[in-house]
Image (cartoon, helix red, strand yellow):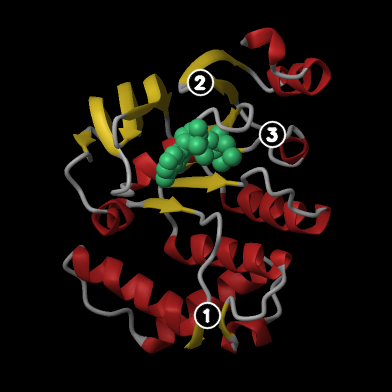
Amino acid sequence: MLHIKNLHAGIDDKEILRGIDLDVKAGEVHAIMGPNGSGKSTLSSVIAGNETYEVLDGDIEFENESILDMSPDERAHKGIFMSFQYPVEIPGVSTTNFIKAAINAKRKALGLEDLPARDMLKLIREKSELLEMDRKFLSRSLNEGFSGGEKKRNEIFQMAMLEPSLAILDETDSGLDIDALKIVANGVNKLRNENNAVIVITHYQRLLDYIIPDFVHVLHNGKIVKSGGKELAHELEDKGYDWLK
Ligand code: ADP
Ligand code: MG
Ligand code: MG
């Protein structure tokens, strides 16, 4: 599904990613861990197409096609979903309307008509039940006054509605509380299947107690310095990152 080859990327004249190779197949969950400043968020931004960063070398293929020349929107329409480190608040736009617009924009890009209102409602009902969400919250303005946990729930709901083939969740170093962690983990576990893949980016091991990854990669100084199975996350919890530097 995702094939990253010798990816070098940076900003101005500073190289941040210094030769990343990563293969993600359908059905897999990969965790990317690493100390602060190792390039985790940069990697997710570059995959999503954030134009702040310049790709200096290498390639990113998604479903056998290079995506480097695609805009963030085109990548999203192809099925890449990216969680936001700092979710935007949009006063006056309800969560439901935001998601409807996102779904119909994606359908339009695929040459499809808008999803009929009845089908949209059915989808909203199905997904909110799956995620055990209070539907009252869907009529509130997007993220406005939402708690950290509510923002996360909203993000997972967007992901459920959009049914991406690749979801990239950057949990950052900001320290989600345990409730928010569980919301993310339960949502991801309910949504994962043999046709989609998830990349979970996290500084701490604790999220990986709830989302069990198939592979764990450690990023240090813009390179993957170690890869392993889920046990690697526990090893890092015990030993920290210094032994890998
Ligand atoms: P992580 O997510 O692993 O903590 P980041 O990807 O956020 O790491 O950052 C990696 C390095 O790149 C850091 O040294 C950071 O300061 C630098 N960096 C990332 N984004 C920018 C930016 N927009 N401008 C300048 N430096 C940046
Ligand atoms: Mg950081
Ligand atoms: Mg980060």
Q: Distance between the residues labelled 3 and 2?
A: 25 Å
Q: Residue 212 carries which label?
A: 3
Closest to the observer: 118 or 221? Answer: 221
Residue where numbered disc 2 is placed: 221
Task: Check if mark 2's residue and mark 1's residue have beta carbons within 8 Å.
Answer: no
Mark 3, Cα crowd under 10 Å, few <14 / some 14-19 / many 20+, is: some
What x and y, as percent, mark residue 244?
A: 64, 10
**Amino acid type shown at disc 2:** Asn
x 23%, y 53%: residue: 71
**Amino acid type shown at disc 1:** Thr
Number of the front mark, 1 or 3: 1
Is tag 1's residue or tag 3's residue first in the polypeptide sequence?
Answer: 1
What x and y, as percent, mark residue 16?
A: 41, 28
Q: Is residue 105 left or right of residue 144?
A: left
Is tag 3's residue or tag 2's residue first in the polypeptide sequence?
Answer: 3
Residue where numbered disc 1 is placed: 95
